[in-house]
Amino acid sequence: MDLTLGPEETAVRDAIRGVLAERLPLARVRAVAQAEPGIDEALWREAGGLGWFGLGSPRRRAVRATARRRRCCSSSSSAAR
């Protein structure tokens, strides 16, 4: 099984890393961990709004596959014109 990330997965990983590096430097992680409830609720809401929690869901994969097919079909039909 090939577990190498493709371009789309690499872009998602890099985007998430960027948000987390910006929003949760090590000092912030330590402060959040020591306070109640021990999580950054605003960051969790933002992550949910960005769709991070559904990235691995079958529905999400199906939606992405459909979008890829549409892009593929529309670009090939445009080229034929």
Image (spheres, rainbow, N blue to C red):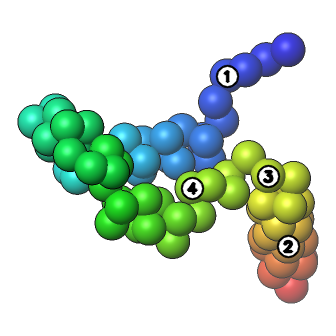
Frontmost residue, 10 versus 76 = 10
**Mark 1 or mark 4: which is in front?**
4
Q: Mark on residue 4?
A: 1
Q: CA distance from mark 3 to mark 2?
A: 20 Å
Mark nearer the N terminus (2 vs 1) = 1
Q: CA distance from mark 2 to mark 1?
A: 25 Å
Q: Are marks 4 and 3 in contact (CB under 8 Å)?
A: no
In the image, taking residue 64 as reference, residue 21 lies left or right, namely left
* Mark 2 Cα shell of 10 Å, populated few (<14), some (14-19), many (≥20): few
Amino acid type, callout 1: Thr
Q: Are marks 2 and 1 in contact (CB under 8 Å)?
A: no
Q: Position of residue 15 (x, y in %)?
A: 41, 50
Q: Residue at x 67, y 22 (%)?
A: 4
Residue that carries the numbered disc 2 in the rendered image:
70
Q: CA distance from mark 2 to mark 4?
A: 23 Å
In the image, taking residue 56 as reference, residue 20 lies left or right, namely left
Residue that carries the numbered disc 3 in the rendered image:
57
Residue that carries the numbered disc 4 in the rendered image:
52
Figure check: 18 above or below 75: above
Residue 54 appears anywhere in the view: yes
Mark nearer the N terminus (3 vs 2) = 3
